[in-house]
Image (tube, rainbow, N blue to C red):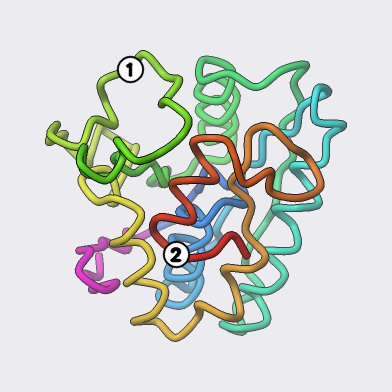
């Protein structure tokens, strides 16, 4: 196992075949870049593509994977599309965990982050719409659960921004990522996820 720094994020690059829940968002894209840069083993990218989004999650994630391959020269990335009628956490967890088991991966990476500080989030025009306290800014959680690793779980999106800048990939990769939950083709700019993105990166694209 290698230990690297991505900005101020401590990141373990585990041995063996690796998997990543690849949403095409800024968090999973950052992890994919570092996995591709620092691992010579096969990396499986699991993309949940849904009927309600016309399965557009897959091409959005695939363009990110293609760019990471270009930037790192790593062609050992396999993209697996996991189709579902609708997107929800239980479906995401079940399908990706089953795929990871089928592929005999050693570690499954997930790019979840915590929310902004309360004083910053209070300025958002849209309220956070998840009931889980997992992402609360004051909650410290383990980052390793057996074979699932969440290195960003105790960091917010501004730490992700700093990691992009530190790696020199902000302009190459960030514009290809997508965070919006209320639109398909472009960021709406109004949902909580768009506001978080703007708060952290200072822009949507």
Q: Is residue 137 left or right of residue 27?
A: left
Where residue 122 appears, as percent x and y from the top left, is 29, 35
Where residue 1 appears, as percent x and y from the top left, is 25, 65
Which one is closest to the eye, mark 1 or mark 2? 2
Where residue 18 appears, as percent x and y from the top left, is 46, 53
Q: Earlier in the sequence, mark 1 or mark 2?
A: 1
Alpha-carbon neighbours of circle 2 within 10 Å: few (<14), some, or many (≥20)? some
Q: Is residue 129 above or below residue 68?
A: above
> Residue 7 magenta-drawn?
yes
Please give the count of numbered marks on the rendered protein. 2
**Residue at mark 1:** 132
- Residue at 38% x, 67% y is 161
Quadrant of the drawing holding the C terminus: bottom right
- Residue at 76% x, 27% y is 50
Task: Identify the secondary structure beneath mark 1.
Answer: loop
Quarter-wise, where is residue 188 in the image? top right
> Residue 94 magenta-drawn?
no
Q: Residue furthest right?
A: 54
Where residue 200 appears, as percent x and y from the top left, is 39, 59
- Residue at 51% x, 71% y is 36
Which numbered dot is residue 151? none
Quarter-wise, where is residue 2 in the image? bottom left
Highlighted magenta segment, given as a residue range: 1-15
Alpha-carbon neighbours of circle 1 within 10 Å: few (<14), some, or many (≥20)? few
**Residue at mark 2:** 201
Task: Identify the secondary structure beneath mark 2.
Answer: helix
- Residue at 63% x, 34% y is 181
């Amino acid at each position: 196992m290698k230990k690297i720094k991505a900005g101020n994020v401590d990141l373990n690059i585990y041995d063996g075949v690796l998997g990543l829940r690849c949403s095409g968002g800024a968090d999973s894209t950052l992890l994919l870049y570092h996995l591709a840069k620092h691992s010579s083993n096969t990396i499986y990218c699991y993309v949940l593509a849904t009927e309600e989004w016309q399965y557009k999650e897959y091409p959005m994630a695939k363009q990110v994977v293609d760019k990471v391959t270009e930037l790192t020269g790593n062609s050992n990335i396999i993209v697996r599309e996991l189709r579902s009628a609708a997107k929800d956490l239980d479906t995401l967890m079940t399908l990706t965990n089953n795929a990871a088991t089928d592929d005999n991966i050693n570690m499954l990476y997930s790019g979840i982050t915590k929310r902004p500080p309360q004083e910053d989030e209070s300025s958002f025009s849209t309220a956070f719409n998840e009931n889980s306290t997992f992402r609360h800014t004051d909650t410290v959680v383990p980052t390793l659960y057996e074979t699932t690793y969440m290195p960003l779980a105790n960091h917010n999106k501004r730490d992700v921004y700093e990691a992009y800048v530190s790696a020199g990939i902000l302009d190459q990769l960030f514009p290809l990522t997508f965070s919006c939950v209320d639109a398909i083709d472009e960021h709406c700019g109004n949902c909580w996820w768009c506001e978080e993105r703007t708060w952290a990166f200072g822009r949507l694209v």
